[in-house]
């Protein structure tokens, strides 16, 4: 089964290109014939000349980033983008969600949906559609939302798995919180699950774990692509123990999204380090998993600076509410977790500690919300690596911050005239705020 | 790629405009070594067959044959425009882009706005349309004019109105040169206040530049050159103040000052012309920096200063560039942004600067800068990979800051001083279509603009609680 990626806006196109590059170079490693076959089928097709072509369409409202992505891909000599699988215009959306959603999206709907349809029809079987974009700007967020809506209309029964990049808290786009609120509230109704990367978190990983002195946007995107790749590359799942899972998106959603009210997913992985120290490091599964579990429950997105005092509250039925109240302040309650292990001796790894009912919301059935995938094929140069995709409270605080800042701005009606100009009214804003407050409330009291 | 058209009106507008074209040519010549007509060039220049004298169709792709500026030159006297046509830049303009008269506006806004505005209306609209028809995606008009005189302020703001009428979708960024307090034009307060009303109502963004600030900056640069302490030498290839390396050979009195403004325009458009890891398109400027439609006056600062001077001062730490951008001495108007209130701020960086450098400096400077309560993190950033000629990096900071208020208050006071005694008023009222109501309306427009800034400024330092959130019933 195959995944069709839809790269939207500057951020989506940069990360999408990195993702295909990571996936391709990982699949070309030694001793991984069936793994490569499965990965290639998932993400690439062969054209008549025998070239490997990414199953992806590239959309942007200005040409610079797309032409860069296409050039980079063909320079790799290993894979390329489809010759006509992209669409761009001359003028960007100017950081205005309303411009992307109400003007550019509808104006170019036909071309864009045709390109998506063509890519979907090229798949023998469609595993799902992966729109990738940032929530901050105008094209990725606004037009991306519109395109996702069109895809939902075209394929009401297919899986849509959105990947979103949340901006740095300061300094990218001033109206980013408005754009985020508008994007998230719409996508929540359209998408099956939303996987989020926060630029601030990834930036810290680059600085502290990867030891990069002058961090560029491309460094940040490489880490995001690495983490995403570690989820999307082939693995054995509980439903396909002897051959690689054929339905990666479906199984991921099935494991993680148990309730339509909860579809925000976050991700952390271990180890993550610069390639020069990787050669001198050895890891054992128990150590990796112990750290990863603590990262999960203490809501740390990287190994460094985990709060080890946070612990899982004991589940005592007689204590009931009391036990819940005693939860450590920093404790991150999960709704579902998916652990993906890749590398040497993976069969010896014991994942029992992730099944502790105390980690999960109390209304969930015991043991029903944890899944594990694995493969002995090491990922992207790491002898052993573990990734956890988590549906938990971990995005609650950043989401609450976004809504808080946007709401404060909305209270003074600052910048609203820029949106009403393109047909997004104050009432539309209020609806979006309501949707997000509902999500915040649900995640606060899982 | 999008295109922009520069409309330069009046003596000052044309002088600044010509420095811009000169520097823009130099910048593209420096980046574009192969002489190919590329996308970056196309944003401000057409490539035409010289045999047709610019009248023929554009040549896209391939080698540069003859470049024509996407410009409209308007002046109601012939001096400056004639000088341009005899000077080294004559190649980039042709006669169809020029609109001139012989008698000037006599430092009277009303003559520029009404008399010439009506007489030349058709010609202006046609000339602009011809320029617009050569663009396949027209994004922005850059209007350059001065506020004090008659043609720049009067006809300039009339042109602004025409642009809005004819091209409501196209962004209008206006660079306005404000007169100094000791201006020798006695009616300059009238002209400026009358023009301000038009700017407030019809521009998307205004970049005010004060003459006095330019004088101060030029002095400081000259001091850097002549102090000779750090072994500073004038760079050969990159000189702006001396005019070397440019098409124009000799320096004219205001060139150094006009170069600063021209640099402002070069830097503001760099990210739209060249590549970068964090593009900042021209339409993002208004979107990010203008929270309320009338409050669109953006204070700019350019650092390091030696990129304006092209003297070889040893480059100080990169971080110093960011610090300087917020200091009083580097602003292009007489204002102190640090002690006023920021509504929003954009940092447009060029050259070898990474996103981590940006983040570090924003984190460092943020605590020292007062921001309005609902936009505490009101930063917009752009990274353009092509630095200014001869330098490794540069920064243009654009701030929507209440520090513009004192400039406006002073202007108002000077206006009121004349207006109270009705001095020189009859010169204006003679002009057909001008009534005294124009003056009182312009005054009240400026007064209410000042009040809007005042109200925001008053919130500075006050603890504003978060707005109560929507409640969700559990």
Image (tube, rainbow, N blue to C red):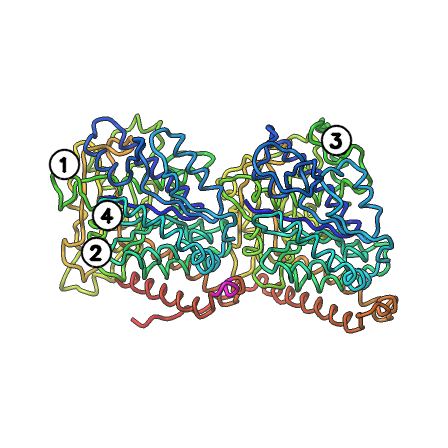
User: Looking at the rendering, which quadrant does residue B50 occupy?
Assistant: top right
- Whether callout 1 and callout 4 share a subunit is answered yes
Q: Nearer the viewer, mark 3 or mark 2?
A: 3
Q: Which mark is residue B265?
A: none
Query: Which element type, helix, strand or loop, lies under badge 1?
Result: helix
Query: Circle 2 is placed at which residue position?
Result: A360
Residue drawn at (37%, 68%) of the image? A434
Q: Which chain does the numbered disc 1 sit on?
A: A
Q: Is residue A93 magenta?
A: no
* First of labels 2, 1 by sequence position: 1
Query: Residue A372 at what x, y percent from top left?
Result: 18, 45
Query: Residue A122 at what x, y percent from top left?
Result: 27, 44
Query: Which element type, helix, strand or loop, lies under badge 4?
Result: strand
The CA distance from mark 4 to mark 2 is 28 Å
Q: Which chain does the numbered disc 3 sit on?
A: B
Query: Circle 1 is placed at which residue position?
Result: A347
* First of labels 1, 4 by sequence position: 4
What span is colored magenta in the figure? A419-423
The CA distance from mark 2 to mark 1 is 25 Å
User: Looking at the rendering, which quadrant does residue B186 occupy?
Assistant: bottom right
Q: Residues within 10 Å of mark 1 (few under 14, many from 20)?
A: few
Answer left or right for B222 relative to A420. right
Q: Is residue A422 magenta?
A: yes
Query: Residue B168 at what x, y percent from top left?
Result: 60, 60
Query: Circle 4 is placed at which residue position?
Result: A127
- Whether callout 3 and callout 1 share a subunit is answered no
Q: Is residue A312 visible?
A: no
Q: Which chain does the numbered disc 4 sit on?
A: A
Query: Circle 3 is placed at which residue position?
Result: B244
């Amino acid at each position: 089964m195959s995944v069709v990626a839809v790269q939207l806006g500057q951020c989506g196109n940069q990360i999408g290109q990195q993702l295909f590059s990571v996936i391709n170079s990982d699949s070309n490693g030694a001793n991984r014939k069936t793994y490569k076959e499965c990965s290639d089928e998932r993400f690439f097709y062969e054209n008549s000349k025998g070239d490997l072509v990414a199953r992806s369409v590239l959309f942007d409202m200005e040409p610079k980033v797309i032409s860069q992505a296409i050039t980079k891909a063909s320079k790799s000599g290993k894979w390329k983008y489809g010759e006509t699988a992209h669409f761009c215009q001359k003028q960007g959306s100017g950081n205005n969600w309303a411009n992307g959603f109400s003007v550019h999206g509808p104006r170019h709907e036909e071309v864009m949906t045709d390109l998506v349809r063509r890519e979907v029809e090229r798949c023998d079987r469609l595993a799902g559609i992966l729109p990738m974009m940032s929530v901050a700007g105008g094209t990725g967020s606004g037009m991306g939302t519109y395109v996702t809506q069109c895809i939902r209309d075209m394929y009401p029964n297919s899986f849509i798995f959105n990947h979103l990049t949340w901006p740095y808290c300061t300094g990218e786009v001033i109206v980013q919180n408005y754009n985020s609120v508008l994007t998230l509230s719409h996508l929540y109704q359209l998408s099956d699950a939303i996987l989020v990367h926060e630029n601030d978190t990834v930036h810290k990983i680059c600085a502290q774990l990867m030891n990069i002195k002058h961090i560029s946007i491309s460094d940040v995107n490489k880490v995001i692509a690495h983490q995403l790749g570690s989820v999307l590359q082939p693995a054995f799942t509980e439903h396909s123990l002897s051959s690689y899972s054929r339905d990666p998106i479906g199984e991921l959603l099935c494991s993680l999204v148990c309730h339509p009210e909860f579809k925000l997913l976050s991700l952390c992985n271990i180890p993550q380090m610069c390639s020069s120290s990787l050669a001198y490091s050895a890891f054992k599964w128990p150590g990796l998993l112990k750290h990863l579990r603590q990262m999960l429950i203490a809501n740390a997105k990287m190994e460094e600076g985990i709060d080890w005092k946070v612990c899982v509250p004991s589940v005592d039925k007689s204590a009931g509410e009391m036990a819940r109240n005693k939860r450590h302040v920093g404790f991150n309650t999960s709704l579902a977790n998916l652990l993906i292990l890749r590398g040497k001796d993976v069969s010896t790894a014991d994942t029992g500690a992730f099944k502790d009912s105390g980690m999960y919301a109390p209304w969930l059935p015991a043991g029903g919300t944890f899944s594990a995938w694995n493969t002995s094929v090491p990922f992207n140069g790491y002898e052993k690596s573990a990734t956890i995709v988590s549906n938990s409270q971990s995005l609650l605080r950043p989401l609450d911050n976004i809504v808080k800042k946007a709401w404060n701005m909305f209270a003074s009606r600052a910048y609203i005239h820029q949106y009403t100009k393109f047909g997004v009214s104050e009432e539309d804003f209020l609806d979006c705020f309501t949707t997000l407050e509902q999500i915040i409330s649900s995640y606060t009291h899982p | 790629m999008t295109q922009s058209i520069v409309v330069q009106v009046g003596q000052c507008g044309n002088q600044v405009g010509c420095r811009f074209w000169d520097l823009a040519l130099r910048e593209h010549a420096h980046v574009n070594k192969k002489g190919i007509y590329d996308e970056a060039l196309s944003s401000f220049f057409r490539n035409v067959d010289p045999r047709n004298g610019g009248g023929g169709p554009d040549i896209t792709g391939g080698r540069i044959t003859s470049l024509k500026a996407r410009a409209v030159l308007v002046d109601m006297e012939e001096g400056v425009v004639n000088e341009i046509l005899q000077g080294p830049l004559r190649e980039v303009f042709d006669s169809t882009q020029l609109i001139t008269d012989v008698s000037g506006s006599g430092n009277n806004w009303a003559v520029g706005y009404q008399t010439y505005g009506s007489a030349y209306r058709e010609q202006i609209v046609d000339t602009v349309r011809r320029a617009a028809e050569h663009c396949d995606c027209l994004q922005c008009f850059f209007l350059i004019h001065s506020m004090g005189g008659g043609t720049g302020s009067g006809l300039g703001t009339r042109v602004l109105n025409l642009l809005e009428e004819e091209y409501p979708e196209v962004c209008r960024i206006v660079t306005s040169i404000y007169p100094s307090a000791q201006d020798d034009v006695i009616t300059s307060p009238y002209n400026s206040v009358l023009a301000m009303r038009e700017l407030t109502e019809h521009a998307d963004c205004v970049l005010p530049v004060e003459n006095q600030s330019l004088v101060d900056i030029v002095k400081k640069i000259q001091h850097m050159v002549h102090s000779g302490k750090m072994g500073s030498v004038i760079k050969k290839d990159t000189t702006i103040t001396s005019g070397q390396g440019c098409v124009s050979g000799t320096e004219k009195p205001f060139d150094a000052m006009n170069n600063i403004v021209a640099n402002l325009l070069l830097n503001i458009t760099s990210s739209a012309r060249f590549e970068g890891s964090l593009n900042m398109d021209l339409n993002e400027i208004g979107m990010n920096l203008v929270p309320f439609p009338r409050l669109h006056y953006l204070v700019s600062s350019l650092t390091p200063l030696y990129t304006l001077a092209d003297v070889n001062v040893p480059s100080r730490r990169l971080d110093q560039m960011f610090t300087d951008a917020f200091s009083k001495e580097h602003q292009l108007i007489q204002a102190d942004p640090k002690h006023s209130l920021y509504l929003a701020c954009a940092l447009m960086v060029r050259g070898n600067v990474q996103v981590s450098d940006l983040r570090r400096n924003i984190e460092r400077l943020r605590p020292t800068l007062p921001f309005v309560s609902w936009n505490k993190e009101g930063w917009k950033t752009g990274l353009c990979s092509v630095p200014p000629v001869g330098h490794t990096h540069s920064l243009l900071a654009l701030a929507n800051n209440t520090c513009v208020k004192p400039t406006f208050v002073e202007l108002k006071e000077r206006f009121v001083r004349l207006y109270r005694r009705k001095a020189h008023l009859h010169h204006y009222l003679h002009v057909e279509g001008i009534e005294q109501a124009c003056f009182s309306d312009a005054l009240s427009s400026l007064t209410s603009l000042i009040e809007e800034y005042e109200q925001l400024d008053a919130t500075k330092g006050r603890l504003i609680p978060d707005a109560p959130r929507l409640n969700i019933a559990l």
